Image (spheres, rainbow, N blue to C red):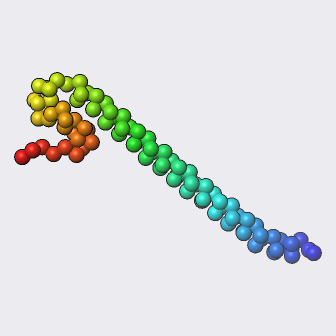
């Protein structure tokens, strides 16, 4: 087989291998992006939970009078921290 014939047959194989490698690279990049997004969501969730615990502790440390000045009772603290508190009309 001449080198010209060999090169003609090698080109489709090389193109196929390059396409395969590009597909693998794209899949790996997508997986890395998804993993990074998942990590960011989990990190944000932990930060929100930490802030909620801190707010809960801070509100719990207030006296009943201080809570009344804020317009809430001690029983309302959990709803305030969770964002579900609705002021009475």
- Front one among 64 and 30: 64
Residue drawn at the location 69% of the way across and 64% of the way down: 20
- Residue at 22% over, 35% down: 77
Q: Position of residue 6 (x, y in %)?
A: 86, 72
- Quadrant of the rendered structure where residue 7 is? bottom right
Q: Where is residue 52 in the image (x, y as percent from the top left)?
A: 31, 36
Judge from the rendering whether residue 39 lies leftward or rightward of residue 21; answer left or right. Answer: left
Q: Quadrant of residue 80?
A: top left
Q: Where does residue 19 sit, x and y in percent of width and height?
A: 67, 66
Picture residue at 15% right of the left edge, 45% below the top: 86
Quarter of the image for the N terminus: give it: bottom right
The answer to which quarter of the image holds residue 17 is: bottom right
- Above or below residue 69? Residue 9 is below
- Between 47 and 7, which is closer to the camera in this rendering? 47
- Relative to 42, is 13 above or below? below
As rendered, which of 42 and 82 lies closer to the eye? 82
């Amino acid at each position: 087989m001449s080198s010209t014939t060999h090169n003609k047959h090698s080109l489709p194989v090389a193109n196929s291998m390059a396409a395969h490698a590009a597909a693998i690279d794209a899949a790996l990049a997508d997986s890395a992006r998804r993993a990074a997004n998942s990590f960011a969501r989990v990190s944000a969730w932990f930060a929100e939970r930490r802030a909620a615990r801190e707010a809960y502790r801070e509100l719990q440390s207030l006296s009943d009078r201080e809570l009344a000045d804020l317009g809430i009772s001690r029983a309302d603290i959990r709803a305030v921290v969770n964002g579900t508190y609705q002021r009475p009309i």
